[in-house]
Structures are given as structure tokens and as C-alpha cells.
Amino acid sequence: MERCGGRAQSPASSLMTPRPAERRPPDSRLSEATDPSYDRGPDEAVLGLASAPFLLLAVPGLRIRRPDDPASRWHPAGHGHPIGALEPSRSPRIESPVRTPAAERTGIDLVYSFPTNAAFELLQDQGCASGVCFGDYDADGNADVFLTHYNRGCRLYRNLGDWRFDNVTDRAGVAGRGRWCAGATFVDIDDDGDLDLYVCVFNGPNLLYVNRGDGTFAEQARAFGLDYSGASVMMAFADYDRDGRLDGYLVTHRLNVGTDHRLPANSQAAFRRLIVRVTGPGQIEIDPAYRELFAIVSKGAGRTELIIAGQPDYLFHNEGGNRFAIVNHKAGIAGNDIGLAATWWDFNDDGLPDLYVSNDYKGPDRLYRNNGDGTFTDVARTALPHVPWSSMGADVADIDNDGRMDFMATEMEGSTRFRRMTINGDLSEERWFLTASEPRQYQRNALYLGTGTDHALEVAYLAGLDGTDWTWSPKFADLDNDGRVDLFIANGMSRDFVNADLVGRMRDRVAATG
């Protein structure tokens, strides 16, 4: 069984060089993102969260805590390494300032439900999520809302004011029907003063809706050179070379359609499927046909392991004239990781936008330092003490009000001891990875304090933010207008795929039935 959503459900395949075998052509890949042959029961149609979102309010001394818990219960003193101002606050219990108006009042009535005819792999991983973005596309002073909804069509809600919204999707021409839509971004891509809309699509061309200025949009991704087709997750825009034009970094995942993407059970299966080939005495490599699905990592002492990999991310440089070009090789962007997020962050305070890329599984997060000449260098190993193992979401804010931008990268660590024990399971087979990964990857969130140098400090334990459950996205904002940055955590999953007890029972059942 393959890993799902970040935690290992079964060990990866350890590889040994086999005796020569007859070569066969690899199986053809399926181009469909759905598997009609899969029969899902009625109870599997609607997503269910494994945990509840957190609203964490900042209190003096950098501590951040949930508004429904006394401060003393949210990581009490002695947890981690208390340092002076970072010790727990003794502030009294407070109530959440956030109130959610009813859908009948707001008009935002979208109810997410997972398509019943979709492949089960999409429910397990990146395909189970959707996208949301906010922007004033009609320049009336109100922030509008755009939501993606799997392959069931997107929604654009125009803000009428007073918490009322109007569904203008069809009138605006941004439904995106028939496509499995993911991350979305409002961006003025043609620099004409109004917001356009970029929408990522899984296993299909991405969409660029250019704002006509009259409340409608025209789809022009191909004309701009931004119609990449693959396992797209989201696009992050910034003018990285300071030429006055917005560039973009496209995060990709893994095209887990068909059957070729499934991790082989052992080394014999890997060679039989022609995923791995021998290149010399004691030397092996991934066949080119599978390099966007698998990778080989060294475990030391001549041992290797086959792990799942993803498609390459892409850096799009704005050439002017509404045309973009991929500049990965020239800019120093590399790797076939399984990406979930990209965030521009000037980590060393030199005035240039650097880039943090959150990667799932054993692919390390990357911190691309902007060299100021159109190129980047991955400095995660030297700039960061460690990174999350299964990194998911990220955000930037000055959390300590020192004038420097700080950064949070999230993982799946439980917020309670019970949750941590049930999702971690037995890590003895991963001991080599915990001690040898570069940079070190740990199963918890990371909160980096900017120092104005080429090195960041990691303080998630001290701030009480090391474990926030299966966290897809953190969002910083001063939610109660007290001058301090607060944090909203969006977490949960369609099913509890990483419950170690459940996984163990499933393995026992499979073993008992042969």
C-alpha cells in the first residue's frame, strides 16, 4: 500500500541489483484522471474532516494559543525549551472574535462533495483538496471570493457588501467545468490595473482568465504560455528579477493516474516493471519513463531505497508582451519533488524575493536564495536548522514585530499526545532517514524567525505551534486588531489514512487472507 498524504503507510522498496531479466516495454499510462471501474460506496461521497481548524491568537511574548483553551493548557511551561519572553502567557481565557454568518445570508452556498466516480488515489492525496482566493476583481472596494470544486465547476462570488455575495460564475465566464481544478490566484498578470485569475488544473491545461474590465473574463492561458498540463497545484507570483513584470513559480505534484504510479512491493517488482535499470556494476537508475513518478535515495553503506517522486516545478519568467518562458535550467531550479506550496519570502532581508517550496514525503523543502542575477541557489541545508518531513502549507508574517519577515511551514503533527501516538506508528524502519536526511526533516511544524542574516531560527516549540494536526494551510493576520499577528490553521483530511492502529489492522487482515 502506498503512502497517503505525508505519512508512510508501508516501507518504500529497498533495491538490490538483480540478475539480468528480459526487457519489456512499460505499461502505457492512462490519460484519464478518473477510474470508472472503481465502485465507491455511498458513505464515501462526501469529505469528512479528521480534525477541526484552529484559530490561534497572539499574546505578549510571541506565544500563540487557541482562543478556546486557557494558555496554561496550550503547551505548558517546560514543553520544548522556554526562553524568557517565549514562556507561556498567563492571559485570561478569551473568546474567538470570529463569527461565521449563515450561508442563507451570505449567498456563499457551495457544499464540497467528492465526485463518486473519481479514482480513489485522488481522495487520498493532493486531489482531495481545492483552492480559494480573494480579490476585488471589479474594483468596487469589496473583496470577492473565488472557489474551485474538483471537476464540478468553480464559483466566483461577487461581494455586494454587508456580508452578502452573488454567484456570478457563469456571467463572468470562469466556471472551468469538466476540469479538476486546484489552486487559484488573483493576479494582475497583464499589468492593466485590474485583477486576472490563474487556476491550476490536475491532469489538464491550466487556465488564465484575463479580466476584460466589464465583469467578464477571457481564457488566454495558451496565448500567455501558461497552459502547462500536468499535476499542477498552485502558482505563486512575484517580480523576482525586479524588471517591473510579475513572474510565476508553478508547484506540481504527482500524476497519480492509471496504475504505473503505484510503488512496487519489492526490488524484484521494480525491475520486472522496468522502473529501475542497471547501468553498471552495482549501479542502478530510474528509467526515463518513470522519473516523474519514482526516485532512488541512498541509505548509506551501499543501500538504496525507491521512493515516490513528482513532476518538476516550473519557474515562468515574464518576457514582456504578455508572454512567459520556462527558465528552470538557467535559474537553477531543479528536482522532481511532490510539491504542495510555494511562498516568496525575503528570508535574509536583502530586498530580493527568495522562494520557499513545501514538498511532501521524503523530498526536502527547498529555500531558493535569490542571487540577484536571475538565478537561485537552494540554501535550505545551511540557512534552516531543519524542515518539516511532510511539508504542506506556508505563510509569511512579522510575528514578533521586529521589522523582519518570519515564516511558518506546516506538517501533520498531532496537537495532542494521543493524536501524535496514533499517527506516528513505528518509525524504526525510517531511522536512517531521520538521522541522514539533508536538511534534517522532522515530523512537526517549523516556525522560522528572520534574523536579517543568511540563517533563520526555528521556534515552533517555543511558540506553541509545533503540532496543529493535518495542516494544509496556515494564514497569518491580525484578526482582533490588537497590533499582533494571529494565525488561522486549516486542517483535516478526507479520511484518517495515517491512523497507525487502523493501518496495522488492515495489514493484519491482508496477511490473514493471503
Image (tube, rainbow, N blue to C red):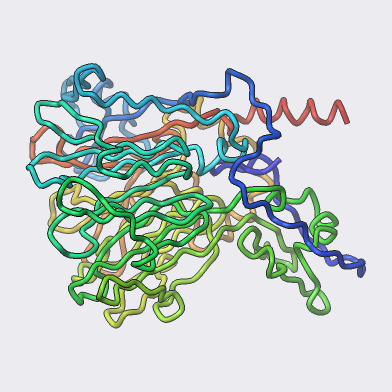
Residue 131 drawn above or below residue 240: above
Q: Residue at x 83, y 31 (%)?
A: 511
Q: Residue at x 42, y 45 (%)?
A: 182
The picture places residue 38, in percent across and down from the top left corner, at 68, 32
Judge whether residue 93 can be spotted in this image: no
Q: Residue at x 31, y 33 (%)?
A: 77
The picture places residue 358, in percent across and down from the top left corner, at 43, 54
Q: Quadrant of residue 122?
A: top right
Apparent side of residue 318 relative to residue 18 in the rendered image (left or right): left
The picture places residue 112, in percent across and down from the top left corner, at 42, 28
Residue 438 drawn above or below residue 171: below
The picture places residue 162, in percent across and down from the top left corner, at 9, 26
Apparent side of residue 423 relative to residue 458 in the rendered image (left or right): right
> Which part of the image, by quadrant, shows the C terminus?
top right
> Which part of the image, by quadrant, shows the N terminus?
top right
Q: Give 216 or 363, whichever is nearer the viewer.
A: 216
Residue 241 drawn above or below residue 110: below
